[in-house]
Amino acid sequence: MIKRIQGYINRFLDEQLDFQERIMRIVFLLAFAAALIGTGRVLAGADPDVLDSLIPLCVVSGLSLYIAVRYRKTRLAAWLLIIVSNLFLFPGIFLSSGGMDSGTPIWFVLGLVYIFLLFRGKDFWTALLLTLAAYLATYLIAYFRPDFMPEAERAYSFIDSYVTLVCVSCFIGIMLKAQSKTYEREKQVVEKQKEEIEQIARSKDAFFANMSHEIRTPINTIIGLNEMILREDISDEIAENAINIQNASKMLLTTINDILDLSKLESGKLEILPRQYEISSMFSDLVNLIWIRAHQKELEFKMDIDPELPSMLYGDEVRIKQVVSNMLTNAVKYTDAGSVTLTAKSERVAPDVILLRISVEDTGQGIRKDSLEDLFSSFKRVDEKENRNIEGTGLGLTISKQLMEMMGGTISVDSVYHKGSIFTIELKQRIVNSRPIGVINFAAQKQMSQRERYKQSFIAPDARILVVDDNTMNLMVAVKLLRDTRVRVDTAESGKECLKKTGETFYHAILMDHMMPDMDGEATMKAIRNQTRGFCQKTPVIALTANVMSHAEQVYQNMGFDG
Ligand code: ADP
């Protein structure tokens, strides 16, 4: 029985209902309860005249309640209650029970409070004006035609007024309490949901970080072992295959980094880290990156880099490079014939600040006017049909736009469909050294072929290093890549094994994986530095990681790694 009643109450104050609807139900219930109590009182022996008004009130509020709960037509129920009680019943009681000498004016207050609780917007104003007009008419009738009203006895007036005062204040009090209770509960629900959303966001971040690590590690193995194949004396066909494996793996790495960047941007965890940088080295990195790709597609790659650009600036070189390289890669991707032009200019906007303007122009397929708007929104690739065969995720420009905004700059595009596009970024950079860069000879840095015969840059048979990684595949790649240098390479598969070796042997350098079970790379590095009977307290420890995100180097140096 109790369970059943609880069920009814739960259904009655269903948490799925919106706030206003729940308040309405409480109001209808109270109105019904009031009328029921009044009717009961009269039936028990009070003044039977009042029954005329209480019975209809009981019926109407009961009906409103039924309509609201059964049919969910709360608006209809509210109007029913207001029309019957405010326009007919309360004025009727007023005129039939002695007007100002009765307790009815206090019921009028309840009628007005109903309106404030039940209605919103246009309905509210309509109900309020109608009620005020009805009350005014009632007062006017009472004033001008006192003969319409029975004379109230003095004792009756006082008792009626007191009882009404107590009833109405209790009702209003209960309604306010119910309202604030509902509000509190609503707030708790919202807070719980907020916490859940934050929890989901946290696990999403952790998932992305773990997943990208899990994906990068094997890709690095592929790239490393593939590099070993390229270093061998192999046939042209095998070399071509190996180069394609290399390109595809690098492409995959870029995509994973993009996804990770986007997830960081969304969670507000991506930071802009400004540092001093050489502008010529930035451009040379960009040219190295794009020149071969343009050459492979038989596109002409042109450059117009203002020799007057200051040689050293202060800003986030890594992020600027990321944005420009995305523009360059796109220009090459979406151009089948003609040229790609990289232009850089600057304008002094303050004694030590320039406005740097870098643009990339292509003679490619261009972008339709109506697609230009969508260009910078997440996952949008425009002209999907035409671009079906061109790899891409539609993330690059979204990330670029957000990065430019974070750096206080802009990215814009101008394009003529089937003629070509020009993407431009503009951002302010502080000058560190205003000496002009002059004319840079990038040609010297261009490598004609990706497959130059590998030659180790040094040989050091007396050097001894230790590579620490829990992944044996990584250890194998490291050992193989270092083979031609003739350095003596020892390996350790855990922090513990590493400490055992550094306690026995002196190493010139230690390459240390970051993510390892039990003792991670950071903890192991710190333990080496403080190892009492160790041989390697002063040995440089270099982080070995699949975390090739931008700024990784800075992050590891801050932890205390030497590189
Ligand atoms: P992706 O190239 O990986 O698809 P981007 O965010 O870098 O993603 O670019 C979004 C879309 O903008 C591309 O899919 C392409 O339709 C269009 N686009 C970008 N750059 C160019 C360009 N230089 N020429 C023509 N279309 C472009």
Image (tube, rainbow, N blue to C red):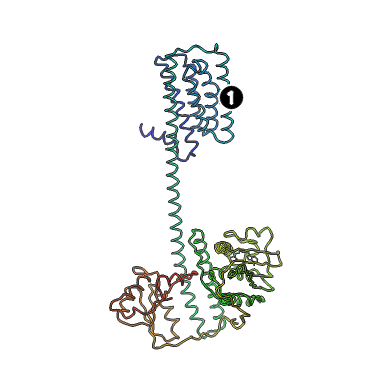
Quadrant (top left, top right, bottom left, bottom right) of the N terminus = top left
The picture places residue 331, in percent across and down from the top left corner, at 64, 70
Asked whether, in this view, residue 417 is left or right of residue 4, the answer is right
Residue located beneath label 1 in the image? 133
| Relative vertical location of residue 329 with respect to residue 44 in this rendering, above or below | below
Asked whether, in this view, residue 440 is left or right of residue 465, the answer is right
The picture places residue 120, in percent across and down from the top left corner, at 55, 35
Res. 324 image quadrant: bottom right
Q: Quadrant of ligand 1?
A: bottom right
The picture places residue 430, in percent across and down from the top left corner, at 56, 69
Res. 392 image quadrant: bottom right
Q: Residues within 10 Å of mark 1 (few under 14, many from 20)?
A: few
| Relative vertical location of residue 250 with respect to residue 142 in this rendering, above or below | below
Secondary structure at numbered mark 1? helix
Q: Residue at x 48, y 23 (%)?
A: 107
Q: In this rendered view, identify the residue nearer to me: 378 or 27.
A: 27
